[in-house]
Image: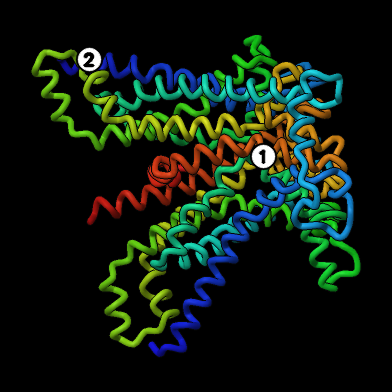
């Protein structure tokens, strides 16, 4: 390759790479910037790129929303509700997913592959078509408008994928380790808890991260099941800005930043685990 | 320990997961099918075994708009994801420090909560103060800023563009991994035979990734069919019902208008479409397992 064409090649590579980076990052970056602008600035044309007088007023409004009689929802409460639901359903999903994952990867029983396949396929039906019957079911069980109901629902939705990830992780651990423990007199459950699960920590973390992010971000089912502002979650709060829109984009930007932050933090600190989950599970729908 | 007690232990261990899926997914799926064939009045079930819901659905002019939009949504979104995902995936497959960084950050759209993505794009596509419309008109291309979400002729295509942004990253990464798994010797052999870059892509890479490409196409279809939050938060089906897809229409009929019969009938149609795509997916995967067994 001649020198000229290789300079051309690297220039092209960098230009394309920069364009992809802008394409991927700009929308969220732009929304986050809005959170630091004043509502006057946001309504003004031409659009200013950087905030002319950066302000935290939108954030202050959101965090003061619990104490004053504003039309804003109580954001500190929304945040804690979302954390409660996301974390408790993550605990449930990892615990029962580990049990089932162990059975699917280590024990043989009739119908094993069929049941695991059925669980995975069930994930593909968790969409808008189930909104109406889920609403009826939760009402029949008296679980409408409750964080407990939301937690149980998210756990049920998250369990198949968590089971799958944990089962895949367990398959990579040599059976001999366990057999050795059992020869030494440990029961199956003892060897599972003492020998296998500690080695499966990466798979458990992967399952936990995926579930946490999904539960924290969920909107559709939360919006039909939660009726009172007391039990609202952050996604309901952000979507409610649609009702009185144009002047509040600084608050939308601030709220969106608050919602995106935990997800981005989990993503960047757990990149390794995230990719692992993707490669194992994504192609399964 | 005996195999028999192992078997009992296994059933106990999977019981919670199976029970949860039966209660919250299989049960509701069955329920919505019966609801679809039940006549409702004011949210009260009247009689079962009626196709009245489907008749009123078919008589509703919005239903046909919904079906057309859903076709644009699924087909347009899938083609967009796969074409853009293949192009970006091929770029990411090149070894360099830049692509290494990009492979990490490209997943950002994939992990962001849908409500956040919807707001970000609503803001950028805004008719007066949206940065995209302002930039285009500022460059003198249009007289006034385009209202991407306010124009019935544009709104579906704007939504498709956003769902492509949202779902493309994983397609790109999967295809990137597939392209990187092409053995180096194949590239070398083709180069010695005098193949140029395009010919190497067409005759060496493409046949190698054909299976991943097919699988990822069907999976994108499933993802996009299941997507609800993006279109709902961005347009709510408007302006004037011009951007309703099945998911948003189900939501509006069931929870804003309380037309449970229509909502259930629409859900049944949605499930039938999903089942068709899932069957296609299983069929493709089955052939892959068989070909692996032959090897």
Q: Nearer the viewer, residue A280 or A136?
A: A280
Mark 2 or 1: in front is 1
Relative image position of residue A157 (x, y in whole percent) = 52, 28
Relative image position of residue B114 (x, y in whole percent) = 65, 41
At a point 41% along the width and 63% down the height, the residue shown is B210
Residue A256 sits in quarter: top right
Which residue position is annotated with label 1? A257
Relative image position of residue A35 (x, y in whole percent) = 74, 42
The chain ID associated with circle 2 is: A
Q: Earlier in the sequence, mark 2 or mark 1?
A: 2
Q: Is residue B291 left or right of residue B95?
A: left
Disc 2 secondary structure class: helix
CB within 8 Å, label 2 to label 1? no
Residue B173 seen: yes
The chain ID associated with circle 1 is: A
Relative image position of residue A226 (x, y in whole percent) = 71, 20
Residue A114 sits in quarter: top left
At a point 46% along the width and 26% down the height, the residue shown is A159
Say above or below: A75 vs B203.
above
| Cα gap from disc 2 to disc 1, whole angstroms | 44 Å
Which residue position is annotated with label 2? A190
Q: Nearer the viewer, residue B279 or B194?
A: B194
Q: Residue furthest top?
A: A142
């Amino acid at each position: 390759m001649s020198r000229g064409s290789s300079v051309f090649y690297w220039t092209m590579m960098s230009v394309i790479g920069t364009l992809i980076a802008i394409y991927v990052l700009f929308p969220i970056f732009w929304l986050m910037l809005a959170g630091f602008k004043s509502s006057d600035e946001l309504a003004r044309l031409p659009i200013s790129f950087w905030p002319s007088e950066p302000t935290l007023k939108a954030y202050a409004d959101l965090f003061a929303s619990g104490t004053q009689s504003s039309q804003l929802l109580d954001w500190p409460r929304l945040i804690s509700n979302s954390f409660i639901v996301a974390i408790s359903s993550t605990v449930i999903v990892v615990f029962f997913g580990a049990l089932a994952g162990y059975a699917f990867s280590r024990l043989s029983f009739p119908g094993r592959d069929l049941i695991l396949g059925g669980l995975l396929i069930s994930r593909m039906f968790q969409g808008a078509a189930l909104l109406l019957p889920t609403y009826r079911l939760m009402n029949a069980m008296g679980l409408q408008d409750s964080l407990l109901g939301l937690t149980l629902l998210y756990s049920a939705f998250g369990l198949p994928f968590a089971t799958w990830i944990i089962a895949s992780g367990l398959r990579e651990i040599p059976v001999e380790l366990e057999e050795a423990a059992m020869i030494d007199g440990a029961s199956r459950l003892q060897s599972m808890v003492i020998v296998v699960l500690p080695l499966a920590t990466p798979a458990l973390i992967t399952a936990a991260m995926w579930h946490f992010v999904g539960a924290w971000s969920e909107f559709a089912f939360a919006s039909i099941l939660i009726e009172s502002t007391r039990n609202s979650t952050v996604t309901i709060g952000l979507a409610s800005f649609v009702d009185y829109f144009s002047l509040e984009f600084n608050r939308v930007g601030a709220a969106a930043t608050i919602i995106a932050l935990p997800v981005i933090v989990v993503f960047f600190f757990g990149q390794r685990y995230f990719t692992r989950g993707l490669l194992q599970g994504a192609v399964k729908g | 320990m005996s195999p028999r007690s192992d078997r009992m232990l296994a059933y106990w261990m999977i019981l919670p997961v199976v029970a949860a899926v039966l209660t919250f997914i299989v049960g509701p799926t069955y329920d919505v099918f019966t609801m679809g064939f039940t006549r409702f009045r004011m949210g009260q079930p009247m009689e079962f075994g009626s196709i009245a819901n489907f008749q009123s659905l078919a008589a509703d002019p919005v239903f046909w708009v919904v079906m057309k939009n859903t076709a644009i949504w699924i087909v347009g979104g899938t083609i967009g994801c796969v074409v853009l995902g293949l192009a970006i995936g091929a770029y990411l497959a090149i070894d360099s420090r830049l692509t290494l960084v990009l492979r990490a950050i490209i997943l950002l759209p994939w992990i962001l909560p849908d409500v956040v993505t919807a707001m970000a794009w609503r803001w950028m596509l805004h008719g007066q103060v949206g940065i995209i419309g302002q930039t285009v008109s500022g460059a003198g291309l249009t007289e006034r800023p385009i209202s991407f979400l306010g124009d019935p002729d544009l709104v579906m295509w704007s939504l498709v563009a956003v769902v492509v942004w949202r779902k493309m990253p994983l397609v790109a990464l999967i295809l990137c991994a597939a392209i990187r798994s092409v053995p180096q010797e194949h590239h070398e052999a083709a180069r010695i035979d005098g193949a140029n870059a395009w010919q190497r892509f067409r005759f060496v890479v493409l046949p190698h990734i054909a299976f991943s490409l097919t699988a990822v196409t069907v999976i994108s279809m499933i993802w996009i069919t299941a997507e609800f939050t993006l279109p709902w938060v961005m347009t709510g089906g408007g302006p004037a019902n011009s951007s309703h897809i099945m998911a948003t229409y189900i939501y509006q009929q069931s929870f804003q208008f309380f037309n449970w019969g229509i909502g259930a009938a629409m859900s049944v149609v949605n499930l039938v479409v999903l089942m068709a795509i899932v069957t296609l997916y299983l069929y493709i995967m089955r052939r892959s397992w068989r070909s692996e067994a032959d090897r």
